Image (cartoon, rainbow, N blue to C red):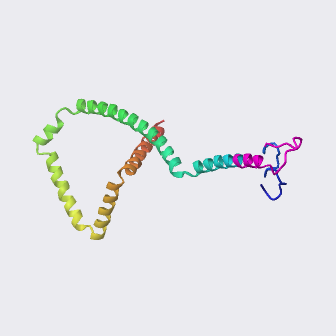
Amino acid sequence: MSASAGPGEPADGSAAAAGTSAAAGAAPDDPEQLRQEIDRTREELGETVAELAAKADVKERARETATGLAGRVKGQVSQARRDAVVGAGIWRRQLAAKTPGTGRAAASRGGTTAGQLRSRAAAAGASVRQATPERVQRAAAQGAGQARQHRGPLAAGAVAVVVGYLVFRSLRRR
């Protein structure tokens, strides 16, 4: 009850909401009516608190949003994967038709093999590691550790970037 409401009247001023009627002539201080009004107010308050709690549960709302987004991203990723497999197969066949035996011919003529490229890359990596300041190496190691600890969000971010790129590329081609 508010300060402006009369005795036996609910805070909103409607006698019908309190289950009383001016014509019925019920006593405003009847204990049974007061109990009913208190019970009704408790129920309304409980419903209001439940609604507010649902709105304030940011974690649950974020989880629902993330679940919806994850479903959409998974669908888009699987479609992109299928498209990539089909495209790679087409490119592979086209390349094989245009360049039969080129890799073997290059290796037989003294061309660079995959093993040689790996050893050159390892040597280049070692020289870069030696030239990199220790502070930068520690920061890189710390970043790698954080990435290992948070693989899920990192993978989701990477997927989002790939999907965004694919969407951008497909829209640009139109």
Q: Quadrant of the N terminus?
A: bottom right
For the point 36% across and 54% down, the residue is: 150
Q: Is residue 55 above or below residue 71?
A: below
Q: Position of residue 123 (x, y in %)?
A: 17, 58
135 left or right of 52 in image: left
Quadrant of the image occupied by residue 99: top left
Magenta stretch: residue 20 in it?
A: yes
Q: Position of residue 25 (x, y in %)?
A: 88, 44
Q: Nearer the viewer, residue 86 or 97?
A: 86
Q: Nearer the viewer, residue 160 or 24?
A: 24
| Total numbered circles | 0
Q: Is residue 112 visible?
A: no
Q: Nearer the viewer, residue 156 or 87?
A: 156
For the point 27% across and 70% down, the residue is: 134
For the point 18% across and 56% down, the residue is: 122
For the point 18% across and 36% down, the residue is: 102
174 left or right of 49 in image: left
Q: Is residue 47 above or below residue 138?
A: above
Magenta stretch: residue 68 in it?
A: no
| Magenta-colored span | 19-39
Q: Position of residue 138 (x, y in %)?
A: 29, 66
Q: Is residue 116 visible?
A: yes
Q: Position of residue 31 (x, y in %)?
A: 77, 49
In the current view of this chain or complex, which residue is farthest to the right? 23
